[in-house]
Amino acid sequence: MAWRVPPVDGFLVRENQGEREDESIDQVVRFSIAHISPETVCFRFSLTVVDGEHSKTVIYLQITPDHLDSLCHDICKLKGPGLPHLDNVRTRLGRKGGRGDLIYLRFQLRNDTRAQCIVPNDFPDYEALDDPARHAIDIFASAASSPSFSLYFPANQLSRQGLDACVEAVQRHSVLKGEELHSYQRAVQLQRLYGGKGGKVFAIVDRESSSQPETDSFATLGFDVVPRHQGSPPQYGDCSNHLEKPGTALAGATNKAESALVDCAPPRYGDTEQSRDAPVASKRIRLGGDEDEDEYGLSHPSSKRVLSRSRSAATFAPALVTKAQRLARSEVDDADVDGNVLLLRDLLRRVNEQEDRQLLQEQENQRLGHEVKRLQEDVLQLQRQNMTSDKRQTEVEGVCDGLEHQQDLVKDELENLQVEIGELEGKCGELEKQMPNVLDELEDLVRDTIRDTLQEDMLRDLIADLVEEHKGDSASGNMEREREGNLTEPLRAYVRENVMEQLATMKAKMRKALRG
């Protein structure tokens, strides 16, 4: 007997060896059987490219008994113990397909052969494909290169007898001959695919053997993800040697500024104007080798170190301001130290700017704190909404279950009604066989009544003729009276009695047939 196995949609789970856990494929795969007979079978998995240049292109993975070491199937009960990845499979199948029993079909592949990946004739090479097409190819490459994989689908999609026939065909696979070979070749011919345009075998390369990223338990397969190389962090001693405390650097800068102001000799009278116009590059003060200098010679931290020194600068800012103010008051009357005054003013300006930046940073931190608080409130509200949605979903699922139960009851009632209708039709047939032909009997009854009436008229005419022949006064009168009343009444009673008997007989037969 040739079984007909319709195509079904399911999810593949790749089985890994060793301590690595199984991995589920993240895309729906359609399973079909191209050919099945008691001697052989041909399986096909189809996958549709969902996006990109080759969108809606169907890719096939063809597996024959030559590629299989064994084939088996079993059922996974909804409330029974199951494998850890079953929850992921049930979630992907959805509420309709994942809430019932599942069947898994396990394909144990051979190491010396490789399943065929079939693509259209105009399909480019792997290097010329875009990411969606590569992803589809990599899914079949991953399944074909694994030692075994399983297909999970709802239990009500395929019959157990059809799956048993597939397993027996794999076990009894032998060399085909004659008509069976011709039928098999015609069924698996690649030219029949893609609407008669034909397909070709795509070379599958195991691209996961060289570099396979570590994934979580039953995570989606990432085929083209290459882990980024990260060097080891530097040692603690190396970092500490290159770092400098902000307070130390700022204190050193302050000491250098004081020594520069104290040790600087006043210019001569003739050189006063020259000192005002000349650049003060010779009086520059370098606070550190990796810091920038401005036009006044003051060094300031680079952009990479501003954030790390902001708090230390804020700590020493009052002391710097006090010292700068004292130096400014002590030397403001000296007209020969204009360069130093400009230096102090610039230092004060920088301190004020640093304080302003610190204030802005605090305001920004407060704003971020309020924003984080608002986001936390939004998260709590979303969690409450999620709980409400889950509750409503549970209620809706309960209503749907009730409707399904009512639908099952209605189906049962309809089936019972059909059975009762069939029984009534049988009884009607029996009644038709038991009931006589009423019209024929009525016709016979009317015919008999008319005949009796005619006989009555003929008898009356005959009596009248006899009376005429043997006319007599007394006899004539008596005969007239008999003719008028005495003879007519018995004849009418006779006819009425016969008609009533016939009608009573017919009514009795009809009652008997209806009761039976």
Image (spheres, rainbow, N blue to C red):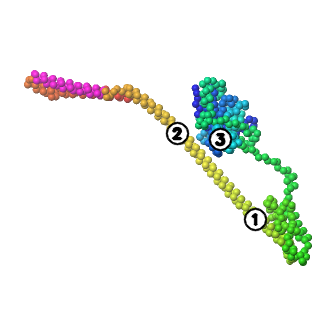
Q: CA distance from mark 2 to mark 1?
A: 70 Å
Mark earlier in primary sequence (2, 1)? 1
Callout in the foreground (2, 1): 1
Disc 2 designates what residue?
Answer: 407
Res 27 label = 3
Residue 174 position (above or below residue 338) = above
Task: Give the prevailing secondary structure in the magenta stretch.
Answer: helix
User: Hey, which quadrant is residue 485 in on the image?
Assistant: top left
User: Which residue is at a point 63% across and 27% down the rendered structure image?
Assistant: 40
Disc 1 designates what residue?
Answer: 359
Label 2 sits on a secondary structure element that is: helix
**Residue 52 colored in magenta in the image:** no
Label 1 sits on a secondary structure element that is: helix
135 sits left or right of 484 in the view: right
| Magenta span | 441-470
Residue neighbourhood size for the residue with mark 2, other residues' Cα within 10 Å, grouped as few (<14), some (14–19), many (≥20): few
**Residue type for callout 2:** Gln
User: Hey, which quadrant is residue 370 in on the image?
Assistant: bottom right
Tag 3–tag 2 contact (CB < 8 Å): no
Residue in the foreground of this view, choosing between 433 and 313 = 313
Tag 1–tag 3 contact (CB < 8 Å): no
